[in-house]
Image (spheres, grey):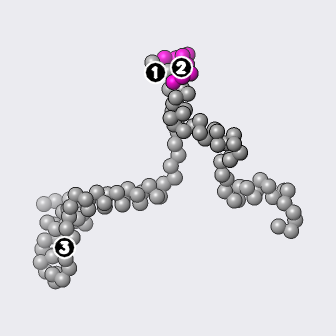
Amino acid sequence: TNAFIVKLFKQDVKYGEVLNKDESQDAAPSKKKKKYTVSSEFKDQLSSLMDIVDLTEPHFIRCIKPNPQNEPDRYDRKGVTEQLRYGGVLQVVQVSRAGYPVRINHQECWDDFKVVASPQI
């Protein structure tokens, strides 16, 4: 076997039992083997994915097609309105109009409005 490939897969649960066979025979049999199932694989993958997602700051760009034929200089008002409605954009506009603006963090708010605060603050 290729030593590089063995090193890559030695820590993997699926292949660890085969690749670490010699080491496990020398060790004391006091530990119970972890049973490997499809659901445990799914759980591990989902946990790993959630760790990655938690580290990101997602930003979404909504692309709106002006017409189903993708032709220049044509605008399908009904189709665009449906895309905006299903994408939730119209709800955001309604909420903003109702007086609930996008939230800004405390530091930005302070920087914007400290000029009107009393000197004692």
Separation (CA) of disc 1 from disc 2? 8 Å
Looking at the image, can residue 97 be seen? yes
Q: 10 above or below 101?
A: below
Residue nearer the viewer, 87 or 69: 87
Q: Name which of mark 1 and mark 2 comes first in the sequence.
A: 1
Residue 68 circle label: 1
Residue 7 appears at what percent x and percent y?
23, 64
Is residue 80 depicted above or below 103 in this figure?
above
Residue 37 in the image: state x and y as whole percent.
20, 61
- Residue 111 appears at what percent x and percent y? 76, 56
Q: Which residues are magenta?
A: 71-79
The quarter of the displayed image where residue 30 is located:
bottom left
Q: Can you see residue 4?
A: no
Q: Please, what secondary structure does the residue beneath circle 2 have?
A: loop
Task: Name which of mark 2 and mark 3 comes first in the sequence.
Answer: 3
Tell me which residue sits at (40%, 57%) in the image. 50
Q: Kindly indicate whether the residue at mark 3 contacts the one at mark 2 (C-beta within 8 angstroms).
A: no
Which sits earlier in the primary sequence, circle 1 or circle 3? 3
Amino acid at dot 2: Asp
Left or right of 104 in this view: 85: left
Secondary structure beneath label 3: loop
Q: Is residue 96 magenta?
A: no
The correct choice, above or below, for 118 with respect to 102 in the image is below
**What amino acid type should be assigned to the residue bearing mark 3?**
Lys
Which residue is under mark 2? 76
Please give the residue where the numbered disc 3 appears in the rendered image: 33
71 sits left or right of 4 in the view: right
Q: In x, y percent, where is residue 91?
A: 59, 39
Q: Considering depth in this image, is 78 or 102 the residue closer to the camera?
A: 78
- The vertical placement of 31 against 102, above or below, is below
